[in-house]
Amino acid sequence: MTFIEEVANIACMPKPLPALHDASPICCAPLGTNPSLDPGDAVALAVRLKALADPARLQLLAYLLDQPNQEGCTCRLAPVIHLSEPTVSHHLKQLEATGLLTKERRGMTVHYRVVPEAIHAIARALHVNCC
């Protein structure tokens, strides 16, 4: 049994964090550069990490990052990760609510675009100068 299958079979999973919608930019210093992390910065970072802690959302983000202009519409994204359009829309809305994506309606479709600064802010916060 693979590690992922073992994790999926665990019956007693910890209580999930509540869904928080926060699209404000994060600008905390890299972890480990200060002995404490401001509680507001901790929440802002946790909200974004929670939004990314889903395989479908990571697949969506990876696909969007590979596209011209780093954008796509739900009609194209659903077949890529083999989920229905409503399910993909839900995941995209979660990423958009945390500021990782923006959306724009064009006629009958909604196009989502990556916010590179938001991705870079997470990477900066998690960057560790070790080894």
Image: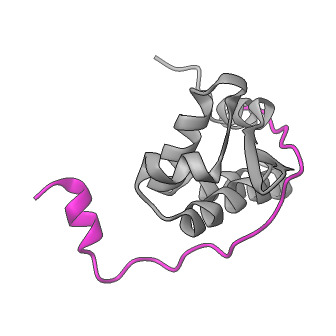
The image quadrant of residue 4 is: bottom left
Give the left or right position of residue 71, taking residue 50 as reference. Answer: right
> Which of the image's four quarters has the C terminus?
top left
Residue 15 covered by magenta stretch:
yes
Judging depth in this view, the residue of 112 and 41 nearest the camera is 112
Query: Which color scheme is applied?
Result: one colour
Which residue occupies the extreme top position in the image?
131
Instruction: State the predominant SS element of the stretch in magenta.
Output: loop
User: Is there any visible trace of residue 100 in the rendered image?
Assistant: no
Residue 124, image x and y in percent?
70, 29
Residue 115 covered by magenta stretch:
no
Where 13 sits versus 1, above or below? below
Where 4 sits versus 29, above or below? below
What residue is drawn where x is 81% and y is 58%? Answer: 39
Give the left or right position of residue 99, taking residue 55 as reference. Answer: right
The residues colored magenta run: 1-30
What residue is drawn where x is 34% and y is 83%? Answer: 12
User: Is there any visible trace of residue 29 in the rendered image?
Assistant: yes
What residue is drawn where x is 49% and y is 65%? Answer: 84
Residue 42, image x and y in percent?
75, 54
Residue 105, image x and y in percent?
84, 52
Give the left or right position of residue 49, taking residue 120 as reference. Answer: left
Judging depth in this view, the residue of 101 and 67 nearest the camera is 67
